[in-house]
Amino acid sequence: MQLTHSEDYKKWISELKISFKQQQLKAAVSVNTALLEFYWQLGKEIIEKQQSSQWGDGFLKQLSQDLMHEFPNVKGFSKRNLELIRKWYCYWQQDTAIAKQAVSQLVKIPWGHNLAIISKANSTAEAMFYVMGTMQHGWSRSVLLYQIASDLYQRDGQTINNFQQTLPPAQSDLARQSVKDPYVFDFLTLTADYNERELEQGLIAHITQFLLELGAGFAYMGKQVPIKVGENDYYLDLLFYHTQLHCYVVIELKVTDFAPEHAGKLNFYLNAVDTKYKQTSDQPSIGILLCRNKDKLVAEYALKGIDKPIGISEYQLTQALPENLKPSLPSIEELEIELAKELGLEQGLDGGDNAAK
């Protein structure tokens, strides 16, 4: 009997491959950590030597030549990279409180990510936000650049909501962090008089990009999802399941400004979803109402007394980016191809395109 035909052997080989790939990944992470720890110490010593010995920038050229002569196969000792190492170290020294804990986090993400963050972020607090986001969500460099350019730091957790009043503390905090304001749908091309169905269809046509904008944890379940209450049929604009919050998320789209009755209708939908779909292991369903504009006080008043968790956010179809950022940003097609490899899109419930609102 040939070993290649043995099921036990095939299974063992498969297990060995998985184990080796896991060890390769661990080794890559370990090498990255060790390298960046060295870069941090090198940056510190470069600054100290320049200050104590009054060496100018000219010594970096000599240092680069000496290190490259000793380690000819190492690419990180070019004069340009030594300058970046110094810049990276100095950047985090602006805030001594953050700097003390920063290095333990910075060494866990790739060098290219570190450079992108310090070149784009406006403060060390914002930079640390993107460092932690990269660690938590495993953003590629392209996705990281997109998140920075779309100003995720300013939009994260800014929605008007009643999560604190309607959810347990841990769930409330995570829900708040999972919702943005505004959402930026600059990947859509719509006519000036677009309606809600066109907006919905545009978002689904770019589902990978839409999921990227929504954030980590959202699994797509369907559009125009039918739900029957009494003798009447109703249709949810968009239905998701959040894998971290462990709950259904109903998204209602409005092409008009926010009105108080919008919150009441979404509250009705959430009651229906909790009755029809929610399992005992699921947390309470959450509603996100996306509108063109909102009056903050009106939105806050509309949520008072509602016992279902709802967030109210605006959306933008376009957002002007600085000209110097545009060449470095990936195209929509590039993002969708890359994210399609990273995201598992669950398509479950789908009520069809022709369902009436």
Image (spheres, rainbow, N blue to C red):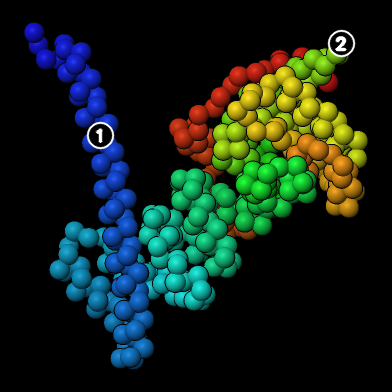
**Rendered location of residue 354, percent (x, y):** 77, 14
> What's the residue at 38%, 73% (across, down)?
86
- What residue occupies the far top of the structure in this picture? 1
Whether residue 351 can be seen here: yes
Dot label at residue 231 = 2
Which element carries disc 1, helix, strand or loop?
Answer: helix
Residue 193 left/right relative to 39: right
Q: Residue at x 46, y 45 (%)?
A: 138
Tag 2 secondary structure: loop
Residue located 46% across and 71% down the image: 99
Viewer can see residue 315: no
Please, what is the three-letter code of the amino acid marked with disc 2? Glu
- Residue 19 — which label? 1
Q: Quadrant of the N terminus?
A: top left
- Position of residue 88 relative to residue 228, above or below, is below
In the visual, does 91 lie left or right of 225?
A: left
Q: Residue at x 59, y 42 (%)?
A: 215
Among the 4 quarters of the image, the one containing residue 104: bottom left
Q: Position of residue 351 (x, y in %)?
A: 71, 16
Is residue 28 placed above or below 341 in the rendered structure? Answer: below
Residue closer to the observer: 112 or 6: 6
Real-space CA distance between mark 2 and mark 1, rounded to the nearest whole angstrom: 56 Å
Q: Residues within 10 Å of mark 1 (few under 14, many from 20)?
A: few
| 124 versus 355 height, above or below | below
- Crowding around mark 2 (Cα neighbors within 10 Å: few <14, some 14 to 19, many 20+) is few
